[in-house]
Image (tube, rainbow, N blue to C red):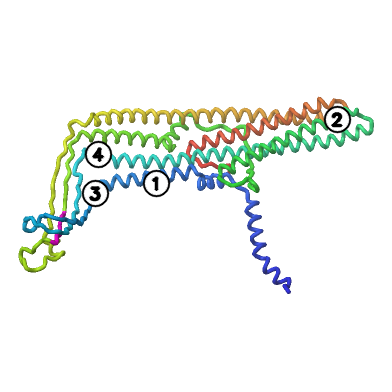
Amino acid sequence: MITMKKLLILMMPLLILYGAVGYSQSKEWSLEECVGYAIDNNIQIKQQVLQTRYQENTLEQSKLNLLPTINGQASHNYSFGRVLDETSYEFRNQNSQSNSFYAGGSTNLFNGLQNYNTIRKNKNQLLASELNLQSIKDNISLNIALAYLQILLNNELVSTTGNQLQITKQQIVKTRKMFEAGSVAKGNLLQIEAQAAGEELQLINLQNQLDIAYLNLTQMLELKSPESFRIVTPEINIDTNTIITGKVEDIFAQAQGIRPEIKSAELNLMASEYDLRIAKGGRSPRLSMSHSFNTRYSDLAINPSAPLDNYTFGDQLNDNISYGVGFSLNIPILNGWQVNKNIANSKINIENTRYALENEKKQLYKNIQQAYADAVASLKKFSASMKAVKSMEESFRYTEQKFNLGMLTPVDYNAAKTQLLNAQSDMSQAKYEFIFKTKVLDFYKGLPLTLNQ
């Protein structure tokens, strides 16, 4: 029989596991946590990491190409019939076996500095690849921030619409009592109920948009499901007297010196210039040194110092050792005009990478210019929306009082309520648009993405 104490002991691991699961499900993610998780798990980032490793191997290989080449060869041969005795250089009609061993290679002494320039080119391409990785991380961080703010916006719209729906439901109760008392016509009650039905539909649509916003963020985070995923809702206050510091030109000058996409384009330009030097190196004579080591064995061989003794395998290998060193100079004269075409193509590639750098700078300037203009416009829109909301809230309270006294029709009441809801929605949209655009500007200044004020 299992006692209550034993049962509790057996259930304790399950209770701890359940508590841990419940805690993980109730955890709310901050913007910083979302960005960090996305950077650690994003597939595109992992692919760029592999590309960077590939560039590291390419650079390492270009350095190793400076080493001499050494290759070995061993062979075992069977000869039948008339064969040459390599010790006496006489022909014999006898079957024989022989072995030969070779080790050798070459060393590139000079080839127009092509190896050196290849190393410099690959080094710049590696640095560019690392900066491309940082650029991808930055773009993903901005997209995460936008998706995060979209959830906050949709959540605020859901809350606002839900509050308005509760007011309408309360008004239905009041109108029904007034109808039952004979103070208002039944049409007034039906119109208020119709308003509530419309607001319920609007609330459902906004809730669906909120669910989709959560789905988008969880997909960007590479999470399997948005179920139980929630984000932190920070307290965000905007001062309508806020001044956007800095000018577009100043922000661009600062961003131009720190943005990875600009530095990457500059490094690619430098790499293309080294590529031109490599192509020009094809015109230079090439000086190389060869080195070799040989030895051999034959069962026909006779020991010249002791002809009557058996000439062993080891003794033959030791006696037949030969090695040498040689130099060769290769002068290119005509090779299908390949060198000239390679030089011409390298010059074209330099122009192309120079245009790519210029395009990156122009795109950066446009992005900063657009974000700055949007931030200024959204701040003005938010300030105007706040004034409109305050005025409409006061107007709606006055309208509601008159409606409760039967002095206004439901049509006028619903129109005032709809105007208030639209103004509140416009204010929320302007608020989060301003936040995002200012974060983009801060991002270009080199500041981290955060919603902490």
Q: Which residue is mark 2?
A: 190
Amino acid, disc 1: Arg
Question: In the image shown, does 294 or 14 lie closer to the viewer?
Answer: 294
Q: Residues within 10 Å of mark 1 (few under 14, many from 20)?
A: some
Q: Can see residue 85? A: no
Position of residue 109 in the picture relative to residue 21 (left or right): left
- Sequence-wise, which precedes: disc 4 or disc 3? 3
Where does label 4 land, which residue? 114
Q: Residue sitting at 35 percent across and 47 percent down? A: 57
Circle 2 crowding by C-alpha within 10 Å: few under 14, some 14–19, many from 20: some
Q: Which residue is mark 1?
A: 53
| Mark 1 or mark 2, earlier in chain | 1
Residue picked out by circle 3 = 67
**Residue 209 left/right relative to 409:** left
Instruction: Name the residue at 36% across, 29% down.
Output: 352
Q: Residues within 10 Å of mark 3 (few under 14, many from 20)?
A: few
Alpha carbon distance from label 3 to label 1? 22 Å
